[in-house]
Image: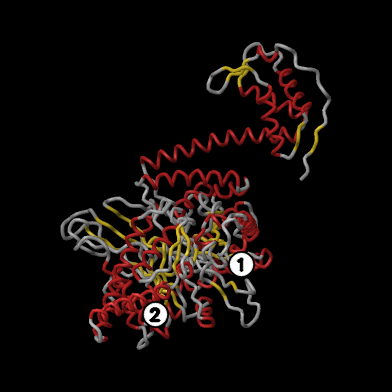
Amino acid sequence: MAKKEVKTVKLDNIAEGAIVELKIIKRNGNKQDFDPEKIKIAIRKSAERVMVTLTPEAEEEVVQLVLDYLDNQTGDADVQEIHNCVEAALEKVNPLVAKSYREYRNYKKDFVHILDKVYKKAQAISYIGDKENSNTDSALVSTQRSLVYNHLNKELYQKFFLTPGEVEACEDGYIYVHDMSARRDTMNCCLCDVGSVMKDGFEMGNLWYNEPKTLDTAFDVMGDVIINTAAMQYGGFTVPEVDTILAPYAEKSYKKFYDEYLEIKPGAEEEAKDYAWKKTKRECEQGYQGIEYKLNSIGSSRGDYPFVTFTFGINTTKFGQMINQTILETHAKGQGKKGRKKPTLFPKLVFLYDKDLHGKDKELRDVFLSAIECSQKTMYPDYLSLTGEGYVCEMYKKYKKVISPMGCRAFLSPYYERGGMEPADEKDVPVFIGRFNIGAISLHLPMILAKAREEQKDFYEVLDYYMEMIRKIHIRTYKYLAKKKASTNPIAYCEGGFYKGHLKPSDCIEPVLKASTASFGITALNELQQLYNGKSLVEDGEFALEVMKYINCKINEFKKEDNIMYAIYGTPAENLCGLQIEQFRKKYGIVKGVSEREYVSNSFHCGVWEDINGIQKQDLEGRFWDYFRGGRIQYVRYNLNYNKKAMITYIERAMEKGFYEGVNLSLAYCNECGHEELDMDKCPKCGSEDLTKIDRMNGYLSYSRVHGDTRLNRAKMVEISERKSM
């Protein structure tokens, strides 16, 4: 855009003595001589912001007009008066520059307001704590620093990235932009290709890592990659098919131990095999234990513990099976002092279920049964069907490609190597490992229905308005992130962690971004149905289904028009579950079945208070399963952890339906005597209330109680206390 020249009439020189006599009172109370150069510098910057060049004559005119306005000034002038005079002078000389000057002044006022809010938040974090994210321990100084920075980043995002209308929609509660503190800088959940990164070596932190030669080294290196790369994003970080990644390194260790034994005792092949197997298994136990230590004690630079998921279970080699069994056995034992062991929260474990491998009398049935025993003790693993119904199963059956969940519930749509969103031909194959999401923005459907009724508008007209709003934010996010440099996440963009991630550090990441998804989140579907006709999803659900069909059709239109892989995501509202109630009550009051509780229901789930059995819950929520391809999980609550037969029945039923199924227990451990019991609030053995309690936080697990305190917000704690079906 060419800069414009502003023509003005040349003025006489400023009268001698006028500058010297006038004093300016600064905001801190100090006085300074009036200096016309400061005015010229300020208006020059304002002109540059709107691509205008003010001539020296124009600048002199502005200064002269300011002095004219101050001509009747009997005393000293304060800074505010000078600003007002400059603005008035610019209106006469160049209104466009005047507008720029005014907006910049408003920015400065806004920044004062923003910094004041950040300071108050910082004080609250330092002395009260923060429970917006259960995956952060706000008692730690490192976490506090990160939380304060995140709050500032959120304010900057709202100020400079969102439009006033979008900010208003967020503040009112019609939409919710997740992770405002991070989404300007990086991407969201991912399936990191850790296996490709480690193979043949890679560079990290200006150091060259050789490819591991043994299993224990592979675990160490994998842990380093996870800690480093997960810190460069937000959301879930999944290592897909970890058994397949580690099996070659287990074989290398086995060969090393086998050869070592034969050097000491030549000819003793059978003894060498037994020795090598035991040593390799021990390496696997210690390696996985080390991963658990790292992921549950070393906070990332984001201030939280990396939200990491491992998927596994279908590798049929003897080393793959050993890794699967060892992960399950080690996780089931827990970590801690003898007699005080408790399960860790990370990595989240997801068992990949193939009926042809894990069904009754099949090759890997014993691995599946070990997974069940692990779930009985720790809730993990969750189970992902590869051979039931739905597109995840279809991709596996047709291409042998696994769509692992990214974190607690996010899933990728197919992206084909040559055709992109659609296969180029019969031979084109989809890619999932190495892809990611760029963020989720959620619709608050009960709010939107209430607004439509209040304004006497068609519900779908109002829904369209907010869907278009989310769409525009996603488009801007794509364009913004596309210009980021590969050096911002070297493992992902330069070392092959992401699909097509072999860029130079100075390259823009746009080529990698093309295969990513962007999510439209859905919360409170149950409350939408309640507001529509006073019935819950258990009692009805037809309107909720109609709405989801409509949203799916709209999103498919957006995908074709924008060439962006939009996805529909069942939002796992954590802090949001309480915030949306506050927002609804502020606009529309307390409505029975909608806003009378302190929380809204997550995504398409039935109300946690519903007195229904597991089969009913699976069927009721199964109606919505195919409408939430971008993010979904189904779970059943078990009041007994020793009923193995019931657990197998429910899980295998879910696998037939093609679900991603979670096991829900309320685990409790006494920190005084080590007693374990489901859902206890006081130890029946020693009477202590010093308990550690673990409950499901949406798709993952969290501490609902740690030494008498909790990392969860009040609304979520109320929800947990009312659970019957979850």
Q: Quadrant of residue 287?
A: bottom left
Residue closer to the observer: 172 or 308: 308
Residue closer to the observer: 88 or 148: 148
Is residue 189 visible in this depiction of the protein? yes
Give residue 254's position: percent from left, percent from top: 32, 78
Give residue 88's position: percent from left, percent from top: 72, 26
Q: Which amino acid does the dot numbered 2 rest on?
A: Glu
Query: Which quadrant of the rendered structure holds the C terminus?
Result: bottom left
Residue closer to the observer: 323 or 451: 323
Give residue 20's position: percent from left, percent from top: 66, 13
Q: Residue at x 51, y 70 (%)?
A: 433
* Pointers 1 and 2 in contact (C-beta within 8 Å): no
Image side of residue 514 versus residue 308, left or right: right
Residue lying furthest bottom: 361
Q: Given this view, does label 1 or label 2 mark the residue nearer the observer?
A: 2
Residue 638 - label: none
From the image, tell me which residue sits under label 1. Answer: 550
- Please, is residue 558 above or below residue 391 in the view? above
Residue 652 - label: 2
Figure colour scheme:
secondary structure
Query: Which quadrant of the rendered structure holds the N terminus?
Result: top right
Image side of residue 178 versus residue 41, left or right: left
Q: Residue at x 57, y 67 (%)?
A: 500
Label 1: few (<14), some (14–19) or many (≥20) C-alpha neighbours in 10 Å: some
- Helix, strand or loop for disc 1: helix
Q: Earlier in the sequence, mark 1 or mark 2?
A: 1
Image side of residue 16 versus residue 130, left or right: right
- Please, is residue 25 above or below residue 638 in the view? above
Q: Which amino acid does the dot numbered 1 rest on?
A: Tyr
Image side of residue 297 versus residue 17, left or right: left
